[in-house]
Image: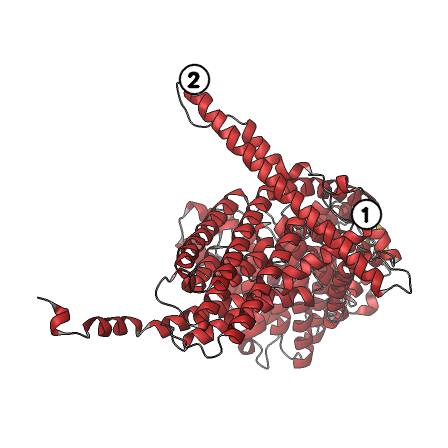
Amino acid sequence: MDWNSHYPDYEVDLQASLDAPKPFIGLYIAAASLICTLAMVADTLSGFRSKKLWFPCKYFAINATSLTILAVTMKLTVDLTNMTGINDELATLSSLVLMSTAMSNSMTSLAPMDTKELLLNLTALAILVITIAVNVCMYNVEAFRYDRAVFLEKMVATFFMLLLLLVLCCSSLAIPTATIYIQSKYREMHKITRVEGGECRLTIDEMKLMIQRYWVMAETSSPQFELAGSVLSASSGLMCLFTALTLVEAHIRLHLWYMDYGDESNYKWSTIIILYIQSSGVVLGTIAPVSRWYFAARFKISELGRRSLRDQLKIERYWTLRLVEWRESSLRVQIRHRRCRKLLHDAKRLLLNICIKVQILVVRTSKLILFISAICGNAIFLFLNRNKILKRPDSQASDEGSDLSRYVLILEGKAEMPKKILRDICNEVNTLIQTGRKKQPKNLVKLLNMSENFKGVTKFDDNKEVPSLHSQEPPNCWSLPVVTLTRIAIALPNIPKDEFMELLSGVSEGLYFVKLIEKSVDGDGELTNIRNAGDAVWVGVELYHKWQDKDIQETCQNGRSYMQVLQELSDKAKKAIEDFKTGTEDYLMRNPLNWPVTVIAANSMYRITQTILLAHKDDDQATDEEVFERLSVMISEIFAACLTNLVHFIRFECHSNVIKERVKRVGQAAVVLGKSEEIIEILQHRELPNFCMDPAKATNIEEWRRAFMEADNENPLASISAVSSNETSIPQSIGEHVSIELGG
């Protein structure tokens, strides 16, 4: 049966029905293009805001997600159907240019990747780019006879897209070796910085200088920073500019030459949306790559006249080392026949020799482009400043910048970092310190001023008098006794609300620092359950005023003494522990480190309440407010002992062997220093025990308890039951630390 004879419009109707959903497919393409555009804009704004003019990739990177979105964005370039309108041609060209723009923007995202990630992501990118290039060439061959200018524009865009892919591949070959070189320089500089910092207690200014040094080292040792400042990154920025200019030229030419040309797009009205979004993406996305090229050329000006052209075009070893190692390595394929192995090895050497020559060609060409850019830029600057001496970017250097320039880590062959950029880097970390300074913990400072020593680390738990409810006791951490004592303090009757709310605020501010210190020293996670128990107690106390699901307000009923409240808390905690002991036979639960957090919290509550009850059994005349104040002082002393480790924490946080974590960790150290300046100044006037010189001991509350118990054989119960602050003795040296009676 001949459908065409019976239904002459069948093919037309079929094609119309097939083309009907294309405008909505166009919207899908526009949405993907918008996502790419917004991600590139976000990276650009982030770079300007932080004055990182190498524009690290934070939001738009080469990975599975971005490649999938780009594949959707490139739908028009692989559509070989009838697309002959002006907007069709422009939209196809804009897609090609947007692809080049996206590749140039995301180039620095390759730097933090390991070898496997580089191989997978670049393979996927290469498949996408080559597929697009093949489809465009196939379509252009057919369209050549209709509009040669369009053919030329698309071929230029395709050429630059393939060239950018080659540049990305060449960069990826140098990244692992360059990273090793920079890592080696970082380790050497870290040793120097550690020696210069010494092991003594640092002042605020000394810590600030230490953070600045490590911040410069962290920023300049970043793989993204190194790649963004390379000659290949500069050349990719220039290519991105050329492709963008190609799109601008096409916009002008097509709309001037074909003003009355009909638009026969299958995508209809959605083509306009795609065109506007992708063209905007090209314009906005070109800012970062072009800025990298411009500033690389600007910095290169400072080297003009210092090095010959031959030295400028010298190829450093890290560019080709990986390829040379592959060339000289043996084949991993097991082949018995010697002649076959020899042929394969020769073929591999030949292929890698070609790759090495291509790598050298690309790098040397990029160096030449950057050198020419610097010469042209220098001529322009001289012309604009013909009546005055040209000021080079590094001519105005502050003393601070001069002092920190030796901590800049750069690869061989790269231009020296201008002092202006170095000052911007230093200003960034100074801003972080200032940000922390604006958030000084006032309530914590007030709490710390209530004590003058660190004896609270022994007073909260009497190991001699309070019997254990289990064969083994879980170790203590800093936060658990603090939150337990806070829970007890606010459960005391007849305490004004403003007083216990002030205590809660001070403890909350102190726990911020305590948790940072605990997490940094508990690298193997041995005390995770103990710390989690403290977190669980604090959430209940701070947010819900509850402990073990019991409302604190119910405990604070009028007419009840603090001794009754303490006894009730102790009994409840004891019952929870005994129920756990009788209800579990799991071998793992015999280890206190594996106990549930509720049981660990109950054990802490039992021991602390029993210690306080024993201390006050002969002092039942103390008022609720006196007991509250004594507990507050005890909390203050524990905080003081823990926070003496802030200097250790800041020093520890500044250094990291993990490249990806360095900037984040040094930034956190800067904020912590800003927040804790007043705290550090308070604690620096207190004499520390000898063991505090060893960070491994100073960060462990059990070491503090052991040292004080060995140095001071006083009964801690007598200290806790001291009546008032008038009985506070003048600090006296016991060994190398101070001892002071706890007063109300």
Furthest residue to the right?
388
Q: Nearer the viewer, residue 193 or 601?
A: 193
Question: Would residue 182 be found to the left or right of residue 538 on screen?
Answer: right
- How far across and how far down the image is residue 87, in percent? 45, 72
How far, Cα to Cα, is label 1 from label 2?
54 Å
Three-letter amino acid code at the position of disc 1: Arg
Which residue sits at x=79%, y=67%? 449
Q: Is 703 located above or below residue 726 in the figure?
A: above
Q: Residue at x 80, y 57 (%)?
A: 378
Please name which of the two marks, 1 or 2, marks the residue nearer to the observer: 2
Secondary element at tag 1: helix
Query: What secondary structure is marked by label 2?
Result: helix
Q: Residue furthest top?
A: 338
Q: As shown in the figure, which amino acid type bears the numbered disc 2?
A: Arg
Kindly identify the residue that appears in the image at 41 percent across and 24 percent down. Answer: 334
270 sits left or right of 217 in the view: left
Quarter the C terminus occupies? bottom right
Q: In the rendered view, tell whether residue 89 sits above or below residue 417.
A: below
Q: Which residue is mark 2?
A: 338
* Residue to which mark 1 is pinned: 406
Task: Left or right? Give the position of 494 relative to 261.
Answer: right
Do residues under tags 1 and 2 come within 8 Å of each other at their CB atoms?
Answer: no
Which quadrant of the rendered structure holds the N terminus?
bottom left
Where residue 45 appears, as percent x and y from the top left, is 64, 68
Residue at the front extreme, as displayed: 145
Of 361 and 671, the residue lying toward us: 361
